[in-house]
Image (cartoon, rainbow, N blue to C red):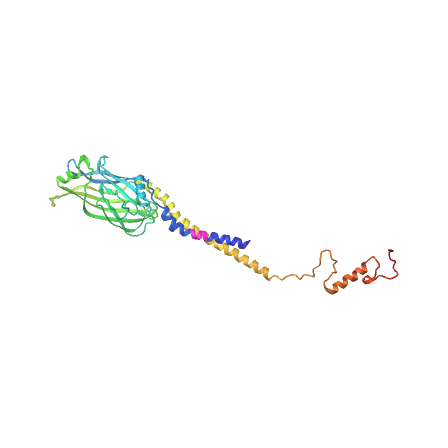
Amino acid sequence: MRRRASLVLLAFAVFFAALSPLIRWYAFPRLAKIPPSQYQDMVLEAKNATLLDYATMKSKKVPKVSIVQTLKGNVAAAEKIKDRTGRDVVVWDTLSYVADDKGKMVSQIPERYVFDAHSQEPVHAGGEHVDGDPVRRQGIEYKWPFLTEKRDYAYFDFQTRTSAPIHYKGTRTVRGIETYYFEQTIPWTKVKVPKKLPLGATPETVEQIGLERWYTTKRMFWVEPVTGAPVDGQEIHKEEMRWKDQPGKKPLTAFAGHVKMRPDFQDATVDLVSSQRQLVLMMTSYLPWGFLALGGLLLAASLVLEARARQRLGELRVRPRRPRGPRRRAGAPPHETRGLLGLFVRRVGSADAGSSGHGCLGYRPRSSARTPR
């Protein structure tokens, strides 16, 4: 019974030990993915910023500039790409809407971002664009991969429509969460004018005035490494309108400010990331290590039962047997024995115990009366 139980425990030990790496290296990469229907909005603010007044074409100080980033998953587009490519993809339609302190639009830039739902790598399946201009992204944007590593990544800048390294700068603690801090600096670069501007201005009208747009930024992200989600983001952002034919003329500051995530949205992001973090840790740490430990315990219990079973078997083999007497048939007298001596005893005993008076060995005396025929 103990040996049978030890075999059962051994089978379960092998099962859980084999299940541990399968969950981590097979199930997790296939199950962990970004949902295609995700919707998220984020508000960032730059206080005491500088804006260009397109009515007077002069720069002015404003108390606050708000940047509203809206992200919406396009499920229908993602399904079409999956039918064509066979890959799980996510299609994000995003909008960066910049407003002044009075809520009036300063600029807005739409995007479409197509990426792999599991690895967050860009998928070039058509339809990618920034402000209507087709692009071919390289690297990440908005989100880091699950289980972010301590290394540099290529990050796509939608203003320049190019990718550049974003450098890992160490760990930081944000609202009780350990994060990886990344930093990217884009030098002064000539960029396209947004297609939607205040007062009906267009890129063509800006060009007719003889201006062109230049941009630089220092981009900072604090990324929760398990989920790959930024819990904080900031930019030291500058834009200028420079005179094309008059390089010595002072440029117009179109926008300048330190952009930070609004505190209430940061709190909501931290709460969301904390809950999602536990799900990822369950697949990458809790279940694999738990099953491995359970397999080890079951193996130890199996070996203990097997050792006890072998010890019991050894005791039974060395235990001395009790001496047994001669066997007798059922109903035989206690003094019955085997062999010639036993035959002799049985015959003598029959004569002595007989009631016919035939005498020893069945001898019949001659004087005995015979039954008349």
Residue closest to the eye, 227 or 25: 25
Magenta residues: mostly which secondary structure?
A: helix
- Find the residue positioned furthest to the front: 373
**Residue 133 in sight in this render:** yes
Q: Name above or below for residue 219 compared with residue 199.
A: below
- Horizontal arrangement in the rendering, residue 95 relative to residue 311 (left or right): left
**Residue 264 in sight in this render:** no
> If the image is split into quadrants, where does the C terminus sit?
bottom right
Q: How many callouts does the rendering have?
A: 0
Residue closest to the eye, 365 or 320: 365
Bounds of the magenta segment: 14-19
Please provide percent x and percent y for residue 353: 81, 59
Question: Which residue is depicted at the point 19% across and 36% down?
Answer: 198
Residue closest to the eye, 268 or 348: 348
The answer to whether residue 224 is magenta is no
Hey, which quadrant is residue 36 in on the image? top left
Please provide percent x and percent y for residue 124: 27, 46
- Horizontal arrangement in the rendering, residue 340 relative to residue 206 (left or right): right
Question: Which residue is depicted at the point 45% across and 52% down?
Answer: 15
Please provide percent x and percent y for residue 156: 25, 47
- Horizontal arrangement in the rendering, residue 11 relative to residue 281 (left or right): right
Please provide percent x and percent y for residue 288: 41, 50
